[in-house]
Image: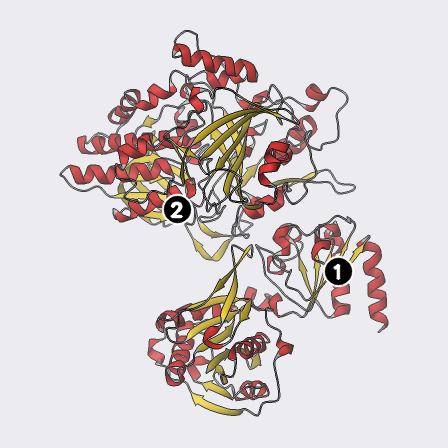
């Protein structure tokens, strides 16, 4: 059996949970899959996930799960795992999973394979690939069979839209087993910063801008294009370094790693530090004046030209629709 | 402000070969002699031991043998014993092998190592002794009581780009010690403070430096026998430029390849990284690398000046060892054994001084006596003028090196020298009225297979810093834009091997210096070479920097 730990916040299911389900389906090879959503009241989110081809969706509920704390989530997950002895526990490699999955694996005295980007084989024969050294190397690992193995999958490595649907899973509400007195963390309200922070990993379309934009005054042009495409704005390092955009919009080895459906790179030369943060995008469109820019080596569509001519034309066309 | 304070007997700043040898020696002294055990702490700015350690490297095991006689049983990572030495003189298209390898470059009985791996191994011995080894903590500031060194303040954490305190702000810790041993490496930021504050360079020759760029490659295993050591002179440098290449063959098809350039060149448009790229395009090197892959990149300055440039290395409450005090033999291209040896001697001096209850300058002066009686002086004194002679060109330098060996360096007055940065000429002096564009004079277009641009190379150094922190390169931008730019054409953009310095030219605005501090590989070249001496390297938030696995 495979247990998927889905993630919700404030009643909204994290899109990456679908990617975790897709990964579990790739891994299952006939094993049944159960999906669990932890929170105070998660029947609705479990109901959404029950539409996938899985055996059962669990709403794991407890008042102590309303705010996220690593202790409560670890306890709830540990109890769930003890009760059902899954072969694998799969979660998306979100900030939340990064926080509690290592503790969960340690408590279970089992293996954690984090940031997985590929699975080959199924069940106990499965091997996992994961990046090392900032994506320069890819390691293939096979966990030793010693109880449930915890897997976290990189955002974007598995396609949410590849989830097989059409199962007729039941939704079961489970009261989480939590010793509230043993929760050591007392979460406070999220920081203002955290409220504004964008999780670019969630974006389906990204318009990224680089040094080719020349000055901060030209940013509205990019923002206009992003608005017309319903995309998030991101940037390469020089732009964030100059303070033209906040640092949480930086893509690359010192920023975020993203894999949206569409990544549009405007005036980005494509230094390797940037490429490691976006090369997993499904479709990459690059606009750059320099035909030798390395960005064209990874682009699916490349336009050699002046972004100040091309972007306004794109906006005009997009706004016609 | 309230700061945490830690009191120890001996504080060692820098977990490289000198610092870790000092720690091991202290532990040994403790075991062999009765008495109250000393408390010892080692500070290291890298996130883990060895992560910032870069060298060629060929290890002369003499100091290692004295420090850890059973080093083989203890699993010292000595990758390959040296089997053969070759020295080549390169011209643009061909090479000549010197029929006789000059004695200083004979490496029989030595080992090719990864210094990073070696330092990591030393650190396991230190930790096994129960010594506190604080990785990820940089020494930011020397703590003085008058002229007495009383310890070191570590850097603050959680400071944002505009000096604001972030939610994770933690002020640095004051570590106070009876004796502080400074092993902060070449152009160490704390040793620099000490030299200025206590005028430790009084009566000494100005320090001389070089910068070494290194790449680790994987090449087909049968191409070159492990244990092969090759050095080159000549191309791509000109006759008046100091430097050369090293090529060391490790087992399993690993090849350490590097290029050292004296930081005393005259041409303001010279670029050491471009020289390295040119070397790789030379048929000799190209044939070695073809079909291989780049694994790692890094850069580090070297103290080349020798004996006459060693600052006074003892003071009230403090000692300096290793590269920080310029203990390197530039003629043998070696310093690890001297770093280890001076670390050991510093440890002995500190131990004896503490036991005798006198850690003043007078009590610690025994360090100098120990050095004078040791193989360090025996090795460095006879060749004390050799690097300075290279200031007169390659052939003068080689002739002088030969004479020094024959005579033991006894016959001449000491050569005087200028600091390397002062030898850089202005654009107008070097190029006359015909000032070229500000491209490097030795520019080549990288092919992204054998040769790379700096930014790509930086990626292979594994360098990472917390992005939201103040720049750790402090630059007087007024001098930069009004003097250095017009006169020298912003040489920092060329001598930095990590693309930290960029001049942005936007239409209608004066050129603006952009500092990409998070690219910095901590080589210190900018602190050394900028002609107006207006760049100061300070440690970034602890843990940041390169990741030199295998280097």
Q: Which residue is farthest front?
A: B222
Q: Quadrant of residue B83?
A: top left
Does residue B194 appear in this view?
Answer: no
Q: Is residue B207 above or below residue A35?
A: above
Secondary structure found at label 1: helix
Q: Position of residue B461 (x, y in %)?
A: 53, 45
Say if labels 1 and 2 share a chain. no
Answer with left or right where residue A290 lies relative to residue B307.
Answer: right
Locate residue B339, reporting x and y percent. 37, 32
Which residue in the protein does label 1 denote? Answer: A222
- Dot 2 surroundings within 10 Å: few (below 14), some, or many (20 or more)? many
Residue B414 x %, y %: 44, 11
Q: Name the residue located 41 percent from the left edge and 28 percent from the top edge.
A: B107
- Disc number at residue B49? 2
Picture quarter containing residue B451? top right
The answer to whether residue B170 is left or right of residue A204 is left
């Amino acid at each position: 059996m495979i247990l998927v730990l889905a993630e919700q916040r404030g009643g909204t299911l994290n899109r990456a949970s679908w990617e975790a389900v897709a990964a579990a389906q790739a891994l299952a090879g006939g094993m049944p899959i159960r999906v669990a959503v932890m929170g105070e009241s998660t029947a609705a989110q479990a109901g959404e996930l029950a539409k996938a081809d899985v055996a059962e969706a669990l709403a794991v509920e407890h008042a102590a799960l309303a705010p996220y704390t690593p202790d409560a989530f670890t306890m709830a997950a540990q109890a769930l795992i003890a009760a059902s002895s899954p072969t694998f526990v799969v979660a998306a490699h979100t900030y939340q999973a990064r926080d509690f999955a290592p503790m969960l694996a340690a408590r279970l005295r089992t293996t954690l394979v984090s940031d997985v980007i590929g699975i080959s084989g199924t069940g106990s024969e499965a091997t996992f690939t994961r990046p090392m050294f900032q994506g320069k190397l890819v390691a293939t690992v096979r966990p030793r069979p010693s109880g449930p193995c915890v897997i976290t999958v990189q955002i974007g490595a598995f396609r949410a839209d590849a989830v097989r649907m059409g199962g007729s899973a039941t939704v079961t509400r489970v009261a989480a087993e939590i010793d509230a007195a043993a929760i050591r963390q007392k979460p406070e309200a999220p920081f203002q910063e955290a409220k504004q922070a964008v999780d670019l990993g969630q974006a389906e379309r990204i318009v990224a801008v680089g040094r080719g934009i020349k000055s901060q005054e030209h940013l509205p042009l990019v923002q206009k294009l992003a608005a017309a495409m319903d995309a998030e704005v991101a940037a390469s390092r020089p732009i964030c370094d100059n303070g033209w955009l906040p640092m949480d919009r930086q893509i690359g080895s010192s920023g975020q790693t993203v894999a949206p459906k569409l990544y549009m790179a405007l005036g980005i030369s494509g230094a390797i530090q940037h490429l490691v943060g976006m090369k997993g995008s499904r479709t990459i469109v690059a606009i750059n004046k320099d035909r030798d820019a390395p960005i064209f080596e990874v682009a699916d569509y490349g336009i050699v030209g002046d972004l100040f001519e091309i972007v306004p034309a794109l906006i005009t066309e997009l706004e016609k629709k | 402000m309230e700061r945490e304070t830690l009191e120890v007997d001996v504080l060692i700043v820098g977990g490289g070969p000198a610092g870790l040898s000092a720690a091991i020696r202290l532990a040994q002294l403790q075991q062999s002699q009765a008495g109250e055990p000393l408390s010892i702490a080692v500070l290291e700015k890298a996130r883990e031991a060895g992560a910032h350690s870069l060298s060629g490297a060929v290890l002369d095991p003499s100091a290692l043998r004295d420090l850890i006689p059973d080093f083989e049983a203890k699993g010292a990572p000595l990758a390959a014993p040296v089997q053969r030495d070759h020295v080549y003189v390169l011209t643009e298209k061909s090479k000549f092998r010197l029929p006789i390898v000059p004695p200083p470059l004979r490496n029989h009985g030595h080992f090719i190592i990864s210094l990073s791996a070696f330092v990591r191994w030393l650190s396991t011995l230190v930790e096994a002794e129960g010594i506190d080894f604080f990785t990820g903590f940089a020494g930011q500031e020397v703590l003085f009581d008058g002229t007495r060194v009383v310890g070191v303040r570590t850097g603050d954490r959680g400071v944002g780009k505009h000096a604001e305190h972030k939610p994770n702000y933690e002020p640095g810790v004051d570590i106070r010690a009876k004796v502080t041993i400074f092993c902060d490496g070449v152009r160490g930021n704390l040793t620099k403070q000490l030299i200025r504050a206590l005028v430790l360079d009084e009566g000494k020759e100005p320090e001389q430096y070089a910068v070494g760029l290194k790449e680790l490659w994987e090449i087909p295993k049968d191409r070159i026998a492990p244990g092969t050591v090759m050095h080159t002179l000549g191309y791509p440098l000109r006759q008046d430029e100091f430097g050369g290449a090293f090529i060391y063959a490790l087992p399993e098809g690993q090849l350490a390849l590097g290029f050292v350039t004296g930081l005393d060149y005259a041409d303001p448009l010279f670029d050491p990284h471009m020289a390295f790229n040119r070397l790789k395009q030379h048929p000799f090197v190209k044939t070695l690398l073809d079909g291989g892959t780049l694994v790692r990149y890094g850069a580090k300055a070297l103290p080349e000046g020798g004996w006459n440039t060693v600052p006074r290395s003892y003071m009230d409450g403090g000692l300096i060892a290793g590269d920080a005090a310029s203990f390197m033999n530039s003629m043998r291209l070696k310093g690890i054994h001297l770093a280890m040896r001076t670390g050991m001697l510093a440890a002995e001096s500190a131990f004896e001084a503490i036991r005798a209850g006198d850690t003043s300058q007078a009590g610690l002066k025994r360090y100098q006596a120990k050095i004078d009686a040791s193989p360090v002086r025996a090795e460095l004194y006879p060749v004390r003028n050799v690097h300075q002679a290279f200031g007169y060109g390659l052939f003068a330098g080689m002739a002088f090196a030969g004479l020094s060996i024959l005579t033991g360096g006894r016959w001449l007055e000491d050569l005087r020298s200028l600091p390397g940065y002062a030898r850089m000429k202005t654009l107008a002096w070097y190029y006359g009225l015909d000032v070229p564009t500000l491209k490097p004079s030795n520019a080549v277009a990288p092919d992204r297979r054998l040769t790379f641009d700096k930014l790509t190379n930086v990626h292979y150094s594994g360098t990472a810093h917390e992005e939201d922190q103040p720049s750790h390169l402090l630059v007087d931008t007024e001098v930069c834009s009004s003097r250095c730019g017009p006169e020298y054409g912003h040489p920092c953009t060329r001598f930095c091997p990590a693309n930290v310095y960029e001049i942005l030219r936007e239409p209608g605005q004066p050129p603006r210096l952009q500092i990409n501090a998070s690219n910095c590989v901590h080589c210190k070249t900018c602190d050394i070479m900028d002609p107006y001496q207006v760049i100061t390297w300070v440690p970034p938030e602890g843990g940041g920097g390169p990741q030199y696995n295998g280097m």
